[in-house]
Image (spheres, rainbow, N blue to C red):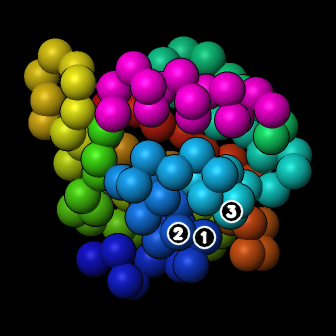
Amino acid sequence: MTANLPQPLANYFAAKNRHDIDAMLAPFASDATVKDEGETHRGPAAIRGWMEETTRKYRVTVEVADATVRGDAWRIAGIVSGNFPGSPATLHYVFTLAGDRIARLEIGA
């Protein structure tokens, strides 16, 4: 299914599965925000910090199970496996794109 995603999302998930922080950050806009685990991270430095912490803590990989789009918003259901209770679990990633960049990402159950 990943091949059907827009390039920024395909790149993000491929990098996430390699645990490559630089490549994970590359598709994000300079003013992007990420909301995960009740916290909001704004801008490249904060998003990088979130990526480094969650990658180190959980070492997750994501298999894209489903994707739907409405305008610039993509909702991705991902089967997430890693170092956390209940793994694997299905999480939902809601991306908002601005052109060829990720402007916003919200992760939830």
> SS at mark 3?
loop
Distance from Cα at disc 3 to Cα at disc 2: 7 Å
Disc 3 vs disc 2: Cβ atoms closer than 8 Å?
A: yes
Q: Are marks 3 and 1 in contact (CB under 8 Å)?
A: yes
Q: Which residue is mark 2?
A: 11
Magenta segment: 45-59
**What residue would you read off at disc 1?**
8
Task: Compare marks 3 and 1 and give the one earlier in the sequence.
Answer: 1
Residue 88 x, y percent position in the rendering: 13, 36
Image quarter where the N terminus lies is bottom left
Q: Earlier in the sequence, mark 3 or mark 2?
A: 2
Image quarter for residue 18? bottom left
Q: Is residue 104 visible?
A: yes
Residue 27: mark:
3
Assess disc 3: are there few (<14), some (14-19) or many (≥20) residues with their C-alpha within 10 Å of its C-alpha: many
> Mark 1 and mark 2: span between their CA atoms?
5 Å
* Residue type marked 2: Asn
- Alpha carbon of mark 3 to alpha carbon of mark 1: how far? 5 Å
The residue located at (48%, 19%) in the rendering is: 37
Quadrant, the C terminus: top left
Residue drawn at the location 67% of the way across and 26% of the way down: 49
What SS does tag 1 mark? helix
Query: What secondary structure is the magenta-colored segment mainly?
Result: helix
